[in-house]
């Protein structure tokens, strides 16, 4: 199993450009998440999904959009990139619910620089 | 609002020098407290989940404990390979859906040989 994979690893965007961060998991997990991590800070939840076709906002959703058409994929879309979106983005997944199955497993991250 | 505060922000240890990291939390009903390890340039790696006060879990040189207000991660006789950022997160019972986690800012640990 590859677990959670993310592409690209690193990207530089100009202000106003758009891009999609890809996330795929092969563990058949229902729940998927997008977080951002700023230097020296903890992770903040952007969006999450409890299953295909169902998404909801997290703590910091402004400037981002998501979709979940399959169990495996959960892309994050930045429409008009701003310098404030410079960050490291992590995708995570977890099984349905209950006991240790609530553990979230993280991908390697995408580092985004907006200039 | 759920809150997690970790201290210290950074910790420099000599190899073999045991120490503890603190994670204080405020949550309206704890479903679970999670510890993760994060190496530079990588995603967080799951270490432990604690569910109730008094619970303890161990993995190699790491031991996590939980009270009603805080959790400690004890590092016993650390080695340089234990150098990493350690993240604490809580999951609240009141969540309608999603198993969402609230993270603390992390403690950066550097173990010198």
Image (cartoon, grey):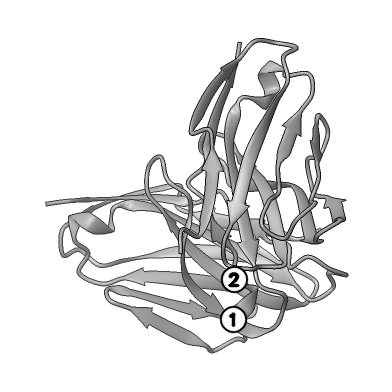
Residue at left 72%, top 75%? A96
Q: Quadrant of residue A52?
A: bottom right
In depth, the one of B63 and A66 nearer the eye is A66
**B41 w.r.t. B52: above or below:** above
Counting from the top left corner in percent of width and height, residue A76 is at 72, 39
Query: Can you see residue B69?
Result: no
Q: Mark 1 — on which chain does it sit?
A: A
For the residue labelled by badge 2, is the local secondary structure a helix, a strand or a loop? loop
| Residue farthest bottom in this picture | B54
Could you say where residue A61 lies in the image, as x and y percent from the top left?
A: 81, 39
User: Viewed as shown, does residue A23 lie left or right of A71?
Assistant: left
Residue at (46, 64) in percent of width and height? A1
- Residue drawn at x 69%, y 53% is A33
Position of B85 compared to B103: left or right?
left
Q: Quadrant of residue A6?
A: top right
Q: Is residue A67 above or below residue B45?
A: above
Residue for badge 2: A103
Label drawn at residue A100: 1
């Amino acid at each position: 199993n590859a677990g959670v994979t993310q592409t690209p690893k690193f990207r530089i965007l100009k202000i106003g450009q758009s891009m999609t961060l890809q996330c795929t998991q092969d563990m058949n997990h229902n729940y998927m998440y997008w977080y951002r991590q700023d230097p020296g800070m903890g992770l903040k939840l952007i969006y999450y999904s409890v299953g295909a076709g169902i998404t909801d906002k997290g703590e910091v959703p402004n400037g981002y959009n998501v979709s979940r058409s399959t169990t495996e994929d959960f892309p994050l879309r930045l429409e008009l990139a701003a310098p404030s979106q410079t960050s490291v983005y992590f995708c995570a997944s977890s099984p349905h619910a209950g006991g240790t199955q609530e553990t979230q497993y993280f991908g390697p991250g995408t580092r985004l620089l907006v200039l | 609002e759920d809150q997690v505060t970790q201290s210290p922000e950074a910790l420099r240890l000599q190899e073999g020098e045991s120490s503890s990291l603190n994670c204080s939390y405020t949550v309206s009903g704890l479903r679970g407290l999670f510890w993760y390890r994060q190496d530079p340039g990588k995603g967080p790696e799951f270490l432990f989940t604690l569910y109730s006060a008094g619970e303890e879990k161990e993995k190699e040189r790491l031991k996590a404990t939980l009270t009603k207000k805080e959790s400690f991660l004890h590092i016993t006789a650390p080695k340089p390979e234990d150098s990493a950022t350690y993240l604490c997160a809580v999951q609240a019972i009141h969540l309608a859906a999603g198993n969402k986690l609230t993270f603390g800012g992390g403690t950066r640990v550097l173990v010198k040989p």
